[in-house]
Amino acid sequence: MITALALRSYSSRMPTIITEADFIQSIADALQHISYYHPLDYIHALADAYDKEQGPAAKDAIAQILTNSRMCAEGHRPICQDTGIVVVFLQVGMNVRWDTTLSVQELVNEGVRRAYLLPENVLRASIVADPAFSRRNTRDNTPAVVHVEMVPGDTVEVKLAAKGGGSENKSKFAMLDPSDSIVDWVMKTVPTMGAGWCPPGMLGIGIGGTAEKAMLMAKESLMEHIDMAQLKLRGPQNKIEELRIELCDKVNALGIGAQGLGGLSTVLDVKIFDNDGSAVVDGDITPDAAAVATGLDRVLEALPSLPVKVVNLGVSVPDDPGVREKINQLWKRGVVTVTVAGDRADAQLDPLLESFASFAGGENVAAVVFPAAYDEPQPGRPAGRGLPLAATTTLGGYPDSTEVTDFILQSTQIDLAVPTSGAPSYTLAGSSCSLREPSSRWAAAEVSGILAALASAYPTARPAQLVTRLLNTTDGRADVPTALTGAGTAQPYEALTRPLRIDRRGDYDQTVPVQTQQQAEAPVVQTDPLVSTREDMVWFGLVGGGVLVLALVLRPVLARRRPG
């Protein structure tokens, strides 16, 4: 599953414009990407299943899936010969403008066509026209199945999957009586599906609404991240989560196992969407702090094998002790967390920030926007400044008549700023878009990139040293931060190249010169011993040449005066 953010705008005065070329290329890039890359959450869950598996046949089957996954990722070849029917879920902001004459369905189909016919990695076309009679293959895997939802805002979010026939053809639907048990129905149905859906995988369940609504919710639930292990670790917080855990354990107890060969892992996760939306996390105005903590937990788990130096946390969440603790654990293990200082657009949508929807003098969201509001004193940070690193934006190339407070929230927790308006954003496939308006979300991403570059340039530096270098090379003063830009606007070149004396605690001593400045000496003029000889030769040459010219001129005159 790939989620692609095409463009975002943060003011109704300049609506987001989605161009035809950008949208089509985003669809094509995403489909190529998922054809040879498994999602990382699936790989982690499958690796855990391999470690726990006791049956030799099932363990070998899981090992083959993991080996195949790596080979496909390295060689950019399809994970499976069945490259699926494309299913797309679109959330289109109501303030978005489209720069195209095509319909959304036509735009998606063109993206599918480009992806499946890409010469470097041609994908199998499985879709037929006239399905009831001639069943003629369309040869480009179009048309796609497209679901469009209009939502508030000015973004376009694309979730897509290439749904293989093995799993799609095992889909089930039932109309249950109010007294019927959902668990009993699932336990009766799963054994009838056999192994054609290539377990271990995910079960998606939709509950409520009409027939088509329930099926749609079941399909969309499969776009969620696999997090069953994390859910069991923290414990269920509502009845839907309790049902998920119960179903996952009971289905795995059936013993179907990997590829139907028996074993402990038939499903890696069970997802449930119901008609009141209570199980839906994606798209909520206020992100789930527990989900953020779970994500940070995954980073902590990956540290022994992955050289992570920077975590970009581009969301704000309600105050949560779990998130605070994870950020501190990351810092102690050498990882800097960068987060958003707060955008005005969030204040206009988030009930927690509604009092800051419009700017007022003396504004300060330091105690409201989390995790930027956490103030955990750490070595290497200016007095009173804590973790994580809170980034905001300047106007950059935006019109001078606009105030930056139209876009960002003021906060005494801001650490530094970067320009975001007009900045380019590139995909792995090389396509690009330009950021239209300032946003601290994009600022957090930029600051994360600068810190990653610093970590690469100074591989032995500790997090405190990297942060101190970044904050003390801005165009402002780290010891006198402001509520608009913190220590000032980041200067990446200065941060990478300026010599600074920073101890291992991250303390920066400005009183000790790093290098002694010496007065430059004037260059010594070299004496040329032949200079006078050269001058004499030039004059002799000029005189001799002049005599020769005069002789040539007078020769005819002298010849006429000779006696006959």
Image: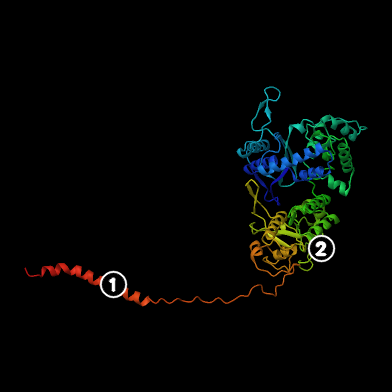
In the rendered structure, find residue 542 and report the number of the disc placed on it. 1
Quadrant holding the C terminus? bottom left
Q: Is residue 276 left or right of residue 23?
A: right
Quadrant holding the N terminus? top right
**Mark 2 falls on what kind of element?**
loop
Q: Residue furthest right?
A: 179
Camera-side mark, 2 or 1 = 1
The one of 321 and 259 positioned closer to us in this rendering: 259
As drawn, 545 above or below 82? below
- How many neighbours does mark 1 have within 10 angstroms: few (below 14), some (14-19), or many (20 or more)? few
- Rendered image coloring scheme: rainbow
User: Mark 2 highlights which residue?
Assistant: 376
**Mark 1 falls on what kind of element?**
helix
Q: Position of residue 487 (x, y in %)?
A: 72, 65
The one of 318 and 139 positioned closer to us in this rendering: 139
Q: Position of residue 425 (x, y in %)?
A: 65, 51
In the rendered structure, find residue 11 and report the number of the disc placed on it. none
Tag 1: amino acid: Leu
Q: CA distance from mark 2 to mark 1?
A: 86 Å
As drawn, 248 above or below 437? above
Q: Position of residue 66 (x, y in %)?
A: 75, 42
- Quarter of the rendering containing residue 133: top right
Q: Position of residue 123 (x, y in %)?
A: 66, 35
